[in-house]
Image (cartoon, rainbow, N blue to C red):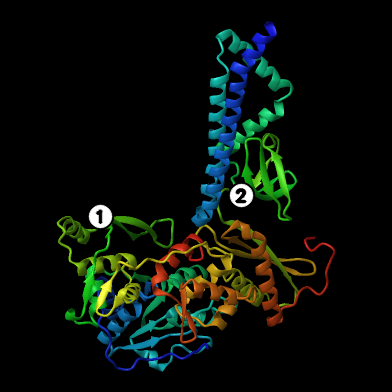
């Protein structure tokens, strides 16, 4: 089912980009610098469902006269001239670069070609990558040397999550049941801050404590019992989703029965037992690609073990789902999968 | 009358004390076993921090048994200074003559628990044995060898033998995988395939500190490709080597890279 098709999107209406203001500003600045002669290719990194494609589509809309847009939706298997005459545009947006390689013997040749052409092209490449795939491939192919500007998508705030979810509804349609026990987050949060050390080539990320200013007002509101059911619901959804819009929407869908939204009965996912190593590896491959066929998973397993029992177990645990014949992580299981596979070192840092 | 008095003394004083001692040691034993069981089971949920959690077990065991011994001594023996000196002399003589090894084992156990030359979960080589440490006791250390033998090593051996720990308390450990190809084979292509086999292995873990290398060496009848990489869980050491070798061999066959045509008795010669 693998395809080497690259799809240039047609003009059509796209959902508005909610959040990511800092990211947009940074990229706009990089594009202006490119116009004045400084080229720094960009890698936009995010977890699955974090809104990478939405951000890139917004950028494409803004720069449609001077850019070319490519979207990869499945594994690119054949070597091809990636930079043809159509790539003569000064800006090239590429969405889904994790599909340029596959974790198997001989699975990196297309990516090698791509990197070679990125290095030789005068165009500015603005690319999106699945964070897990990026962390893997940077160890294998040092891709960060080709994309010196790395932008990590920040989580949505409660207000942004609300906007993102409610854009398809009218206010009058919904009733909120927010009688849920909200555990307010701590006033301090830790965000990764890249620090350049003289003896290391790549920056080291140190956890930098920041005060949750937004949450100070929420804490005060909570004390005064002023939070409405709607605010409580979106606060809880944002917290459970870790600010990931796709995960937030999935939680919303699970707790929404027209016209009522009820989070009382929603329970976050739990894994009954530790995963077997083979299962964890296959789960990691699915999370790394975003969407993958059974044949590709079999190739990743290298014929070492049957993947049928693994897929059955992961499907029955509702950690993965099958969409159009391809396997994907269930959005509401994403944070659990992230935590589990980081512990098992399936995801590299 | 004298006999009756002695019997009464035994019934009134010694037997209750013995019962107390037995009960204290049984409780200590059960407590140590339960805590060990819970910690070892729980440690599986901690991923790469597994070994750190398991290291608490021997230290807790030592604390529990020391507390039990002190409790028994406090209840059984109330010694004056002269009696204490006499008791110490007798105790020293007993250690010197009969309990020397046992005492050395206990001291060795305490040193292993606190100095940590190796830990539970480490792959160690001590004397002729190599295997994973599964239990650190007060008297002995138990390891499981790759052929599934359960080996008990007295703790006093730490004073007389060197110990090699392959992972030094970490979950990851380095593995070395060798493959041999013919001199006429395309070495560049072979290295490319071998690299891919390593970085795509489900057992390999790569970070700044855990990197992989590939070395080549010309032998008389072959070219040796040697990979050094880190397996992310040392329990997969042998499976990792086997998996990389198998996948490399299959890919070599598909790419027309052949093994050495002529084999000598010793490939390392």
Residue that numbered label 1 is attached to: A187
Q: Is residue A17 left or right of residue B10?
A: left
Position of B6 relative to A339 (above/below): above
Q: How many marks?
A: 2
Q: Residue at x 56, y 54 (%)?
A: B171
Q: Residue at x 64, y 75 (%)?
A: B188
Q: Residue at x 55, y 14 (%)?
A: B78
Give the SS element for disc 2. Answer: loop
The picture places residue B195, in percent across and down from the top left corner, at 60, 71
Query: Toward the viewer: A286 or A84?
Result: A286
Q: Is residue B266 left or right of residue B43?
A: right
The picture places residue B80, in percent across and down from the top left corner, at 55, 10
* Residue A247 in view: yes
Position of B92 relative to B164 (above/below): above
The picture places residue A69, in percent across and down from the top left corner, at 35, 87
Residue B139: which quarter of the image? top right
Dot 2 surroundings within 10 Å: few (below 14), some, or many (20 or more)? Answer: many
Residue that numbered label 2 is attached to: B122
State which chain disc 2 sits on. B
Q: Residue furthest top?
A: B1
């Amino acid at each position: 089912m693998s395809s080497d098709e690259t799809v240039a999107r047609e003009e059509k209406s796209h959902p508005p980009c909610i959040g990511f203001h800092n990211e947009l500003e940074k990229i706009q600045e990089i594009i202006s610098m490119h116009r004045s002669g400084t080229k720094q290719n960009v890698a936009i990194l995010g977890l699955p469902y974090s809104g990478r494609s939405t951000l890139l589509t917004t950028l494409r809309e803004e720069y449609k006269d001077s850019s070319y847009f490519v979207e990869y939706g499945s594994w690119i298997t054949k070597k091809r001239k990636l930079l043809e005459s159509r790539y003569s545009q000064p800006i090239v947006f590429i969405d889904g670069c994790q599909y340029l390689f596959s974790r198997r013997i001989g699975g990196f040749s297309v990516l090698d070609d791509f990197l070679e052409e990125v290095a030789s092209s005068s165009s500015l490449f603005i690319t999106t990558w699945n964070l897990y795939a990026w962390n893997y491939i940077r160890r294998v192919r040092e891709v960060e040397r080709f994309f010196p500007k790395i932008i990590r998508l920040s989580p949505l705030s409660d207000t942004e999550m609300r906007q993102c979810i409610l854009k398809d509804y009218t206010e009058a349609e919904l009733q909120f049941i927010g009688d849920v026990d909200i555990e307010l987050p701590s006033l301090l949060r830790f965000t990764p801050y890249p620090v350049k050390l003289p003896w290391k080539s790549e920056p080291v990320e140190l956890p930098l404590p920041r005060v949750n200013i937004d949450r100070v007002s929420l804490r005060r509101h909570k004390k005064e019992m002023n939070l409405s059911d709607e605010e409580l619901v979106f606060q809880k959804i944002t917290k459970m989703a870790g600010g990931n819009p796709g995960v937030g929407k999935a939680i919303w869908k699970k707790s929404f029965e027209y016209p009522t939204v009820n989070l009382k009965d929603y329970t976050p996912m739990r894994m009954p037992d530790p995963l077997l190593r083979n299962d964890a590896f296959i789960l990691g491959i699915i999370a790394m690609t975003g969407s993958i066929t059974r044949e590709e998973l079999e190739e990743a397993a290298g014929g070492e073990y049957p993947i049928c029992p693994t897929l059955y177990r992961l499907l029955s645990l509702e950690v993965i789902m099958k969409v159009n014949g391809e396997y994907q992580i269930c959005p509401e299981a994403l944070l659990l999968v992230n935590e589990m596979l980081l512990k098992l070192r399936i995801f590299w840092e | 009358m004298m006999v009756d008095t002695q019997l009464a003394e035994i019934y009134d004083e010694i037997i209750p004390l013995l019962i107390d001692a037995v009960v204290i040691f049984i409780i200590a034993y059960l407590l140590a076993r339960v805590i060990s069981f819970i910690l070892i089971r729980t440690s599986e949920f901690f991923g790469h921090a597994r070994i750190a959690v398991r290291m608490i077990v021997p230290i807790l065991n030592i604390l529990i048994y020391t507390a039990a011994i002190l409790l028994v001594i406090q209840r059984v023996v109330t010694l004056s200074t002269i009696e204490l000196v006499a008791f110490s002399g007798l105790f020293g003589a007993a250690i010197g003559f009969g309990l020397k090894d046992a005492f050395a084992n206990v001291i060795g156990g305490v040193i292993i628990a606190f100095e940590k030359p190796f830990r539970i979960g480490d792959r160690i080589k001590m004397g002729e044995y190599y295997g994973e440490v599964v239990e650190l006791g007060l008297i002995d250390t138990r390891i499981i060898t790759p052929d599934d033998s359960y080996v008990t090593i007295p703790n006093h051996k730490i004073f007389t033998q060197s110990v090699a720990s392959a992972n030094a308390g970490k979950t990851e450990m380095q593995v070395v995988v060798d493959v041999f190809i013919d001199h006429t084979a395309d070495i560049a292509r072979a290295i490319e395939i071998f690299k891919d086999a390593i970085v795509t292995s489900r057992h390999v873990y790569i970070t700044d500190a855990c990197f992989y290398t590939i070395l080549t060496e010309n032998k008389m009848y072959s070219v040796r490709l040697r990979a050094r990489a880190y397996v992310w869980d040392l329990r997969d050491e042998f499976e990792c080597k086997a998996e990389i070798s198998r996948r490399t061999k299959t890919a070599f066959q598909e790419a027309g890279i052949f093994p050495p045509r002529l084999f000598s008795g010793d490939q390392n010669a």
